Image (spheres, helix red, strand yellow):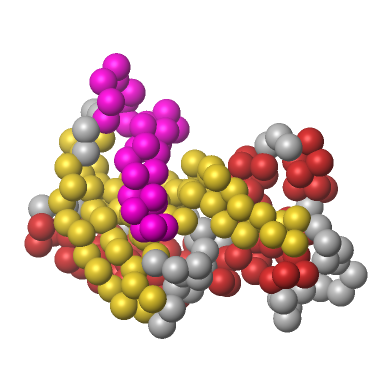
Amino acid sequence: MQAAMTMVRFRDLLLAAATFGLCALHSQVPRTRQTKVLHFKTQRGDLTVEVNTGLPGKPLASSIALSAEGAEGPTTAEEVGILRQVLQQMASFGADPRELVLIHFYIQEPDVVARLAIAAAQSENWRAAIKTGRGTNSVVATLLNDLGAYNAFNDALAAYGMEVVRVGGVEDVLVKKLASLHLNNAPPGLDGTMSVPTGASAFVTVGKKKTP
């Protein structure tokens, strides 16, 4: 169920990605070509990877969607290993890893969820967003960027001269009480009754690696 929803959201987010400067935005809906669907086994279940090519103004641009089955996805370390395999295979089915512009996923990696929940519990901006019911998406994106939550993807991207630029497109944020997560590494003194983010649809934009 989660995988199917993620794939649908991924196509919707390609249009959003265009507005973030990934490509020239034309009047027509972006037309992508599904190049390949790959399936992997992880310790926590199955991970489906969909590779697409083509964005308005960038017909060679490629994008990847990661969709995990189950309530808990693979760790970022597992995702990096799978991403490395996908990048190595892309040329064989007509996609260029050096033209990758977007990786879409649903935030459910246990390591990311734990770090995000703790950061949110310590964030005045998150508390304000929860109180007013406004701005939760942008606060989650900021927290993830500040944490460098998906910078581990660079371990796979570096071989192609690429790197993670930033997290964006955060939508459909799920929240739970902090205490319900049973985090062993949570700093003492945090309010266990606080609602914290535990999942969301999101993407990272990918660009050419900056030279020092």
Residues shaded magenta: 1-30
Residue 102: x %, y % from top left:
36, 47
Name the residue rendered at 52%, 64% in the picture: 108
Q: Note whether 133 is above or below 188 in the view shown.
A: above
Residue 143: x %, y % from top left:
65, 52
Q: Note whether 87 is above or below 21 in the view shown.
A: below
Chief SS of the magenta region: helix
Q: Nearer the viewer, residue 190 or 58?
A: 190
Residue 184 lies in quadrant? bottom right
Q: Nearer the viewer, residue 204 or 190?
A: 190
Name the residue rendered at 50%, 70% in the picture: 72
Q: Residue furthest right?
A: 189
Position of 98 compared to 111: left or right? left
Q: Nearer the viewer, residue 63 or 41?
A: 41
Q: Note whether 140 is above or below 69 in the view shown.
A: above
Asked if the stretch drawn in magenta spans residue 41, the answer is no
Residue 112 lies in quadrant? bottom right
Asked if the stretch drawn in magenta spans residue 2, the answer is yes
Name the residue rendered at 10%, 57% in the picture: 93
Position of 50 compared to 162: left or right? left
Residue 158: x %, y % from top left:
35, 63
